[in-house]
Image (cartoon, helix red, strand yellow):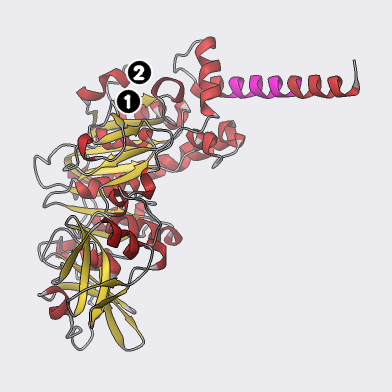
Amino acid sequence: MTDLDSHASGATNASDEAGADLRRSLAAALGTVAISDEELAAFSAALLTRHRNALRCRSEIDQADLSFPVRPVDWYSLGYHCTDSEARPSRTLDYAAGDFFIQDAGSMLALAACEADVPPQRDRLICDLCAAPGGKSSALLESIGDGFLLANEPIKSRIAPLAYNLARTGNDRYAISSLDPEVLQTRLGGVFDLVLADVPCSGQALLGRGKQSLAAVSPTQIEHSALRARRILSSAIGLLRPGGRLVLSTCTFADAENESQVRWLLEKDGVAAEPIDRLADYASDDSGCSYRLWPHRHRCAGSFAASLRSDIGAAAAVEPASRKKRKRREKPERLPDELGEWFGVTPQRYQVAGAVIWAWPEDAPSWAESISAAGPELTYRTGQTWKPSHEASLRRTGALRGLQSVDVDDSTAQQFLSGQPIACALTGWCVVRHRGRPLGWIKASRGTGKNHLPAAARMEVGVG
């Protein structure tokens, strides 16, 4: 045997041993979750494979409206897999216009448990307890109707991408808080109809994307994640009104972080399983409320979701925020005079935060201003000059939408999205629209619209 052959043989043996170690670790992590040795090998291999993202569409977008071939995601009616490996959905005008978001199909399991793809039967008050970067929060916001979403993200550095993803929905019926779940419960306990707890976890489903190391399957990491999640879940239960629903979600496969957590919750007085009939094919145990997606079975990175109902809120609810002394809102001497020119109306519910102003619908919950670390941005200041915010240009619902707009063709939309000025016969601030969908602001004068699209929102697109 040559040195080269010996080296290759050694590398193969090392790889085989590493694969065997991973399978043993996965088998231990799965615990009582039944899986054969043969399937364990397929699961282990698929776990290290990068799965292509899927599309999550707005409810008004039909499969036929998309400019590339797709097939439905089985567990979520607004989800689609792109079947053309050469297509780049994120480089289309339809993506730029917010017709769809891009995310792993596995993350849509929790959205199905939240019933985010069906018209709301009532206007729900929803809390996404660990909301960044906003893939699930934006879906909940699109489904909100006349309800309201609180997107809570305890890590302040993650608020910016969350705020941007919520703004892309064009909906202003949300607030963003940045509180530890225990603190949030003391302020808004017993309030919400639905709480999504997409808890921090060992992240085993992220291995294929290179966003997690093999430490994700270690007993130490799993135990640490499970203990942290239990603290969060205790607060999540306390946030619910009597009869409210808790959806637990993870992107991991360890029993200790998934089914065991559900069993622990079901041992609490007043907590019951809330089965989701449409997800029965994905049931992971006999609890009647726990569901799994597997990377080797379902062509996604995989995920876990559970649905529970709680009446604990009746006893745990704190004094409603509306009865507490509300934090005094900082207001300028007067709002910018230009607001009427930009939007046609001025807000009655708003908050000044340094050089930005957030504004909410008049029927937003009474606690919206006092709880917020961010919100639907309306205007910002550079020096002494106020300008309309990019987020406000994307508004599709509510009263505070751009008053002037110009609808452009495909070529001009591409030009605008690349950051270039465009021709415009109007004067002043105008929202650029493509087939009625808002893209951003221009400030028009003498036949030219100066581009005010933020650098982060600019992109090179094809005709979609």
* Residue 228: percent from left, percent from top: 46, 43
* Residues at marks 1 and 2 touching, judged by CB atoms closer than 8 Å: yes
Crowd band around label 2 with a 10 angstrom C-alpha radius: few (<14), some (14–19), many (20+): some
- What residue type is disc 2 on? Asp
Relative side of 80 to 27, left or right: left
Q: Is residue 121 above or below residue 259?
A: below
Residue at point 31%, 54% (across, down): 96
- What residue type is disc 1 on? Ser
Q: Is residue 38 above or below residue 299?
A: above
Counting residues from the N terminus, which is met first, the one under dot 1 or under dot 2? 2
Residue 207, magenta (yes or no)? no
Kindly state the secondary structure of the residue where label 1 is placed. Answer: strand
Question: In the image, which disc is placed on residue 189?
Answer: none
Relative side of 10 to 458, left or right: right
Q: What's the magenta bit mostly, secondary-structure-wise? A: helix
Rendered image quadrant of residue 4: top right
The residue nearer to you, when weighing 281 against 301, is 301
Question: In the image, which disc is placed on residue 290?
Answer: 1
Q: Residue furthest right?
A: 2
Q: Is residue 215 above or below residue 364?
A: above
Q: Is residue 344 visible?
A: yes
Residue at point 29%, 68% (across, down): 390
Rendered image quadrant of residue 155: bottom left
In this figure, which residue is indicated by the disc labeled 2? 285
Crowd band around label 1 with a 10 angstrom C-alpha radius: few (<14), some (14–19), many (20+): many
Q: CA distance from mark 1 to mark 2?
A: 7 Å
The residue nearer to you, when weighing 417 against 386, is 417
Rendered image quadrant of residue 354: bottom left
What quarter of the picture does the N terminus occupy?
A: top right
Residue at point 36%, 43% (across, down): 89
Q: Which residues are magenta?
A: 13-25
